[in-house]
Amino acid sequence: MILLQERATQTDQHRSRYRAFDSFTVKDGFQFLSSMILPLMLGIFTVVITFHQQKAAQEQRLEDRNESRIQREQELYIAVTQNEAQSKALKARYQDDVLVAYVKEISDLLKENNGSLTNNSIIAIIARAKTLNAVRQLDQSRNTQIIRFLYEARQLTVTQELSALDFSTAEHHDIDFRDLAINKTKLPKISLNGVFLKNATFIGIEMENVNFSSAEFDNTSFSSTYLFNVIFSYTRFINVNFSSAEFRSVNFSSAELNNGSFHLARLNPYSGSTI
Ligand SMILES: *[C@@H]1O[C@H](CO)[C@@H](O)[C@H](O)[C@H]1NC(C)=O
Ligand SMILES: *[C@@H]1O[C@H](CO)[C@@H](O)[C@H](O)[C@H]1NC(C)=O
Ligand SMILES: *[C@@H]1O[C@H](CO)[C@@H](O)[C@H](O)[C@H]1NC(C)=O
Ligand SMILES: *[C@@H]1O[C@H](CO)[C@@H](O)[C@H](O)[C@H]1NC(C)=O
Ligand SMILES: *[C@@H]1O[C@H](CO)[C@@H](O)[C@H](O)[C@H]1NC(C)=O
Ligand SMILES: *[C@@H]1O[C@H](CO)[C@@H](O)[C@H](O)[C@H]1NC(C)=O
Ligand SMILES: *[C@@H]1O[C@H](CO)[C@@H](O)[C@H](O)[C@H]1NC(C)=O
Ligand SMILES: *[C@@H]1O[C@H](CO)[C@@H](O)[C@H](O)[C@H]1NC(C)=O
Ligand SMILES: *[C@@H]1O[C@H](CO)[C@@H](O)[C@H](O)[C@H]1NC(C)=O
Ligand SMILES: *[C@@H]1O[C@H](CO)[C@@H](O)[C@H](O)[C@H]1NC(C)=O
């Protein structure tokens, strides 16, 4: 009997414990879950924030890297342009030195030789070598100065007793002969035989007693020039413009002409020009 009662109370206790557990799982389960939502949300939030921060940090790093790369590129650019400017300045100074030395040497030769580089054949050879050597090293604007210097020293003019300095095989680009001409319009008695001129301009210049024999002209404009007693024998022309030019006694014998324009050019009927 006691044993039975004991068992019954045990079962009761057992049941009530079960019931207690049941009510715990249902009621407190919700409580537990709802208490878990906040930490869970916090956890997710933290994860999201961390992820976001990492991404932002990475972007910042990339940007910083970009910035330092851009800075490096700018520094390199500045260094390169400074270098270029420096080498340009060095080159300009070198060319100035060549020009100054050339003018001084030729001036000395002129003083020592009674104002002529051509009366003595040895002096003529030396002067020609010095000239070609300088011309080879100089740019177009300094070469124009050389031609001007020689022309004004009357070494590119033929006189009764003296010939002009032999300028043949010298090659010149982009020379505007209006810069050399007296009053921008007159270029008398210049002798440039055998010279090679590319992209030269003689527009509107009056030329008298000029010898261009055996010269070569590529892309050169003689438009509106006045040519009197001009020798173009054995001269080669490629892309030459003689439009509106006036010819009086111009000798084109044995000249070679490739693509020339003579639009509105005037040939004086009594000039004896030979074309
Ligand atoms: C880095 O610079 C390039 C252009 O140089 C740009 O296209 C890119 O968006 C930049 N990246 C960052 C993270 O700023
Ligand atoms: C110098 O040149 C002039 C002509 O320009 C000439 O009369 C004179 O004899 C020359 N003198 C010498 C030393 O060559
Ligand atoms: C040229 O040289 C000769 C001597 O070789 C001299 O008699 C003559 O005067 C010179 N001419 C000029 C213009 O210097
Ligand atoms: C030709 O020469 C002119 C000056 O006479 C210059 O302005 C031009 O740039 C030159 N053209 C070429 C292709 O060299
Ligand atoms: C150059 O022009 C000036 C004035 O325009 C004139 O007095 C002078 O004679 C001219 N020179 C030549 C060589 O034509
Ligand atoms: C030819 O000369 C003209 C005028 O000087 C210039 O504008 C042009 O660029 C030159 N062309 C070539 C191929 O040199
Ligand atoms: C023109 O130059 C050529 C080549 O140097 C020469 O043979 C010729 O005698 C010169 N003509 C004149 C008129 O000076
Ligand atoms: C002929 O020469 C002119 C300049 O004088 C140039 O504009 C033209 O392109 C040239 N034509 C050919 C086919 O070379
Ligand atoms: C020749 O030069 C004139 C004047 O500069 C210009 O009007 C003409 O178009 C040129 N002709 C050619 C074929 O280049
Ligand atoms: C033109 O030049 C050639 C070669 O220099 C010469 O033989 C000829 O006599 C000259 N013609 C005239 C009309 O001067």
Image (spheres, rainbow, N blue to C red):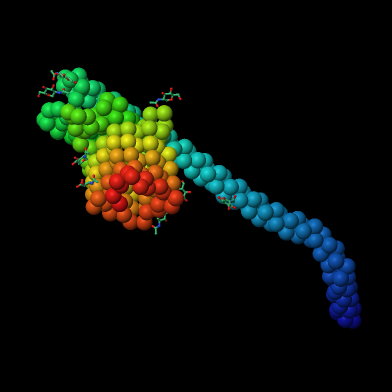
Residue reaching furthest to the front: 270
**Front position in the image: 40 or 6:** 40
The number of numbered discs placed on residues in the rendered structure image is: 0
Residue in the picture at 20% in, 19% down: 111
Q: Pick the quarter of the image with the N terminus.
A: bottom right
Q: 233 left or right of 120?
A: right
> In the rendering, at what x and y percent does residue 158 appear?
23, 32
Can you see residue 139? no
Relative to 140, 118 lies left or right: left
Q: In this view of the protein, which residue sits in the foreground, 136 or 157?
A: 157
223 vs 168, left or right, is right
Q: Residue at x 19, y 25 (%)?
A: 116
| Spot occupied by residue 109 in the image (x, y as percentages of width and height) | 18, 23
Q: Is residue 242 above or below residue 95?
A: below
Q: Is residue 94 above or below residue 265?
A: above
Residue 151: image location, x then y, percent = 29, 30
Q: Nearer the viewer, residue 73 or 108?
A: 108
Residue 120 in view in this figure:
yes
27 shown above or below 62: below
Q: Does residue 113 appear left or right of residue 100 in this picture?
A: left
Q: Position of residue 100 (x, y in %)?
A: 29, 25
Q: Residue at x 20, y 29 (%)?
A: 160
At horizontal 29% and vertical 46% (from top left) the residue drawn is: 272
Quarter residue 215 falls in = top left
